[in-house]
Image (spheres, rainbow, N blue to C red):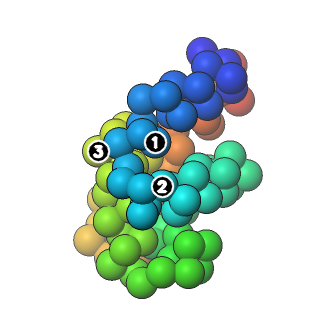
Amino acid sequence: MNYWNLKGRIERDVLPHFSSRRQDNAQAVMRFLYARPVVDVKAVTELTQTTANTASALITDLVEHGVLIEFTGQRRNRLFIFQDYIELFRR
């Protein structure tokens, strides 16, 4: 998979599942992830200028759609990684 395939898959298969209210925030998070592929709830809260609950729900949706993976194994201060994007650089 290359960058364009990954980006196209997310835009075609993932982002349309978000409600119109959340679409802008989801797209903003995706743009952010291409620059910084590891995020936490605080970063998404600041980026989207929403509450921690809203940011957490957005992250949860991205996890459920396979975009993000939680990799700390903790209940608090969790970090999420955009694994498919990072894999592009490991080849």
- The amino acid beneath tag 1 is Leu
Does 60 sit left or right of 25 as displayed?
A: left
Does 13 sit left or right of 2 as displayed?
A: left
Tell me whether the residue at label 2 lies in contact with that at label 1, contact meaning CB atoms closer than 8 angstroms: yes
* Residue picked out by circle 1: 15
Q: Seen from this angle, which residue lies furthest front?
A: 20
Residue 50 can be seen in this image? yes
User: Looking at the picture, does residue 87 appear above or below residue 1?
Assistant: below
User: Looking at the picture, does residue 87 appear above or below residue 31?
Assistant: above
* Residue picked out by circle 3: 64
- The amino acid beneath tag 2 is Gln
Tell me the distance, in whole angstroms, between the alpha carbons under discs 2 and 1. Answer: 7 Å
Q: Secondary structure at mark 1?
A: helix
- Tell us which disc is closer to us: 2 or 3: 2
Does 77 sit left or right of 46 as displayed?
A: left
Pointer 3: residues within 10 angstroms few (<14), some, or many (20+)? few
Q: Quadrant of the C terminus?
A: top right
Q: Secondary structure at mark 3?
A: helix
* Residue picked out by circle 2: 23
Where is residue 37? Give x, y as percent.
61, 50
Where is residue 22? Give x, y as percent.
43, 61
Pointer 2: residues within 10 angstroms few (<14), some, or many (20+)? some
**Residue plotted at (46% across, 42% down):** 15
- Tell us which disc is closer to us: 3 or 1: 1
**Residue plotted at (42% across, 71% down):** 55
